Image: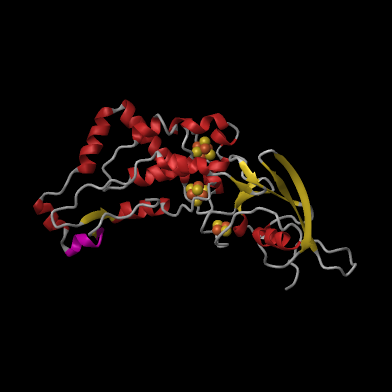
């Protein structure tokens, strides 16, 4: 393979071009950046270079990864200070004329080198009541409008990389907020449940009190770093804030929406709804549809 275009050469010495990563090494007790210089190879992503450093120069370097395809959410780190998936960050997009810094996510405690303890996120997940569908309609099926399916689909793309959690200023520099704040990933999770037409629970009080939705001031930093391009603020957080405000300060609107949302069709309406003309706009399932993370 040939060196990639923007890799610095060695000034006509004939030696192969190199790239230097300044990787944070240490543990909970402290640490520092250490420079590692290896050969530059065309087409590599940051995780490839980290793996080569691990193989050739630092066998004890700790790094978490699994799929190398942007789908497992394991290889989250900060590349030149920006939260990124290392397996999805091409070396050709970075300035290789200076060392590229690779550090662990700052919002979570370091375990070793690039590996952080993200158990805070799993503790938050356990506090969110799971999907709770009501009984099926008269013919034993569940019906959802295509619009509701499409809306939930965006939220189900989350790979739990926790980059949005890492960048959220409410916890990034304020460890003390963690017990009372869920963070953007879990606002996405609650949105997927709250907007599910078959779910019967109401999590808005939980959002307002225990999950700290009010601490989010819609800076949109979470949306900017999401590798799945989920519109976290516009499609999840802002609609949730509106619902929470309605529930807390506009009980008439809340009651009206509750009645409309939970209304079950009459037998006549069900018969009409099952006509071929209606069915092309509906999704009919015999089991409750799964919700991500359940
Ligand atoms: S928009 Fe809210 S959740 Fe997202 S980073 Fe900003 S404060 Fe955090
Ligand atoms: S919402 Fe996006 S950034 Fe946050 S955990 Fe899911 S995939 Fe990662
Ligand atoms: S290794 Fe799976 S997302 Fe990077």
220 over 90 or under it: above or below: above
Query: Which quadrant of the structure image shows residue 290?
Result: bottom left
- Left or right: residue 216 versus residue 16 is left
Closest to the observer: 153 or 68?
68
* Residue at far top of view: 249
Spot occupied by residue 80 in the image (x, y as percentages of width and height) = 69, 48
Residue at coordinates 42% horizontally, 53% vertically from top-left?
Answer: 154
Query: Which quadrant of the structure image shows residue 1?
Result: bottom right
Residue 50 falls within the magenta-colored stretch: no
Number of numbered callouts drawn: 0
- Left or right: residue 265 versus residue 75 is left
Closest to the observer: 162 or 239?
162
* Residue at far left of view: 268
Closest to the observer: 182 or 229?
182
Spot occupied by residue 235 in the image (x, y as percentages of width and height) = 42, 45
Spot occupied by residue 167 in the image (x, y as percentages of width and height) = 57, 41
Q: Which residues are magenta?
A: 276-284
Residue at coordinates 38% horizontally, 42% vertically from top-left?
Answer: 190
- Left or right: residue 13 versus residue 294 is right
Spot occupied by residue 34 in the image (x, y as percentages of width and height) = 77, 49
- Left or right: residue 171 versus residue 206 is right
Residue 233 in view, yes or no:
no
Q: Colour mode? A: secondary structure
Residue at coordinates 41% horizontally, 31% vertically from top-left?
Answer: 210
* Residue at far right of view: 13
Residue 161 in view, yes or no:
yes
Residue 281 falls within the magenta-colored stretch: yes
């Amino acid at each position: 393979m040939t060196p990639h275009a923007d890799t610095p050469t060695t000034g006509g010495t004939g030696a192969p071009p190199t790239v230097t990563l300044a990787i944070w090494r240490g543990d909970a007790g402290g640490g520092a950046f250490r420079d590692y210089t290896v050969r530059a190879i065309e087409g590599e992503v940051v995780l490839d270079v980290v793996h080569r450093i691990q193989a050739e120069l630092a066998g004890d370097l700790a790094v978490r990864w699994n799929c190398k395809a942007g789908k497992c959410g394991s290889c989250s780190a900060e590349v030149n200070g920006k939260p990124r998936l290392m397996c999805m960050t091409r070396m050709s997009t970075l300035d290789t004329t200076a060392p590229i810094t690779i550090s662990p996510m700052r919002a979570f405690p370091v375990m070793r080198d690039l590996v952080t303890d993200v158990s805070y996120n799993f503790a938050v997940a356990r506090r969110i009541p799971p999907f709770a569908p009501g009984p099926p309609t008269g013919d034993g099926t569940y019906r959802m409008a295509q619009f509701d399916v499409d809306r939930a689909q965006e939220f189900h793309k989350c790979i739990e990389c926790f980059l949005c959690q890492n960048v959220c200023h409410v916890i990034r520099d304020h460890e003390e907020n963690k017990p009372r704040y869920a963070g953007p990933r879990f606002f996405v999770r609650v949105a997927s449940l709250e907007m599910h037409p078959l779910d019967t629970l109401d999590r808005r009080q939980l959002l307002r009190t225990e999950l700290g939705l009010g601490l989010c001031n819609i800076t949109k930093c979470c949306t900017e770093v999401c590798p799945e391009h989920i519109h976290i603020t516009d499609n999840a957080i802002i609609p949730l804030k509106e619902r929470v405000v309605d529930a807390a300060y506009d009980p008439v609107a809340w009651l009206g929406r509750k009645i409309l949302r939970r209304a079950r069709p009459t037998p006549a309406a069900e018969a009409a709804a099952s006509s071929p003309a209606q069915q092309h706009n509906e999704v009919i399932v015999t089991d409750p549809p799964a919700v991500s993370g359940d």
